[in-house]
Image: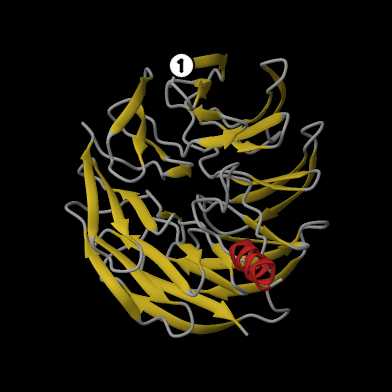
Amino acid sequence: MRLLTLALIAISVAAQDWPQFRGNPKLTGVATSTLPSTLKLLWTWDSGDLIESSPAIVGNTVYAASHSSKLVALDIATGKPRWEFKTEGEVGESSPAVAGGMVYVGDLNGMIYGVDAATGKAVWKHKAFSEVKSSPAVIGDRVLIGSYDENLYALQAKTGKVLWQFKTNGPVHCTPAVSNGVTYVSGCDAKFRAIKIADGSEAYVVDAEAYVGASPALTEQFAFFGTYENQVLSVNLTTKKVAWTYEHPQRKFPFYASAALAGDKVLVGGRDKMLHCLNAKTGKALWTFLTQARIDSSPAAVGNLVYFGSNDGRIYGLEIATGKKVWEYEIGAAVSASVAIGQGRLIAAAQDGKVYCFGQ
């Protein structure tokens, strides 16, 4: 009975985490934690340089990285650093992923790191041939991560050894999404690729017909992502064809942020300054919410609300059903990183170099 109780506790704790970019391997942007009805600022931590990387939350620790060449572990209660790890280059948009007692991240010098989550000591490093803005996804004994050297890498989680690499025809900017033994990459080469995790072979490819910077969000049957040709696409993973496309009738701007999937709704921010809520089955627009600057921050859904940052210097909370604003916090600096929600906290990072913790 005691072993069963401990196991249930461990599962419960893990279910409150946000261990990687978009919260989970399918990149759905949906929290398994809850948030209090009223959010207030609990603490901030200053990295010393701008932050584009999105935080991760595991247990009582927040992991964040910045252009100050720091990967840091912060106490979620106080914001005080537990440790700081110095990367060789600045960390851009690559966001920490935490799994198996390790933290993984890439930098703009092309270095990929495996760091001990308890001590902040480097366990291994791997050098790609160009900058790394992709965030790692950890599946079993493999770390999947892309590079601007046009490769998707599968590295051994414990050693950093290259198990395979898949060459595309453009930079791999996105974070790989994972489902049922396959990883999906929406690429800068205008291709949406399904690659087998076991051996790195290509299962199939779908023509996206546009440059893609966003990462795909997955359900069991569909993938959703925006493009630089001002469209959001739904790809049917069974038929291997585009199911629908959405484009705003007036405002023609790229979609750079990744989507969140909340039930039957797709939520995605655009450089048209709007958060768009679409019907997942049809691509029909249900509502839009206008901010004062472009939205490169990918939204995070929790319960009946969605939270996201804008380059207008604010973080917003909206009702998913209606798009009605229910919360706003003005940071005063662009928020291009995505928020993380875990352990009853909302963690945000901004281009003023600070990490912000909101809770009750």
Q: Residue at x 64, y 65 (%)?
A: 7
Q: Residue furthest left?
A: 88
Where 152 falls versus 141 (above or below)?
above
Q: Quadrant of the C terminus?
A: bottom right
Compared across the picture, whether 277 is left or right of 101 comes to: right
Viewer-closest of 246 and 7? 7
Q: Quadrant of residue 166?
A: top left
Decide: few, some or many residues near mark 1? Use Cα within 10 Å; few <14, some 14-19, many ≥20.
some
Viewer-closest of 326 and 63? 63
Residue 353 seen: no
Instruction: Tell me residue 263's x, y (percent).
Output: 79, 47
Instruction: Tell me residue 223's x, y (percent).
Output: 65, 31
Residue type, mark 1 in image: Ser
Q: Quadrant of residue 327?
A: bottom right
- Read off the residue under disc 1: 201
Circle 1 sits in a helix, a strand or a loop, which is it?
Answer: loop
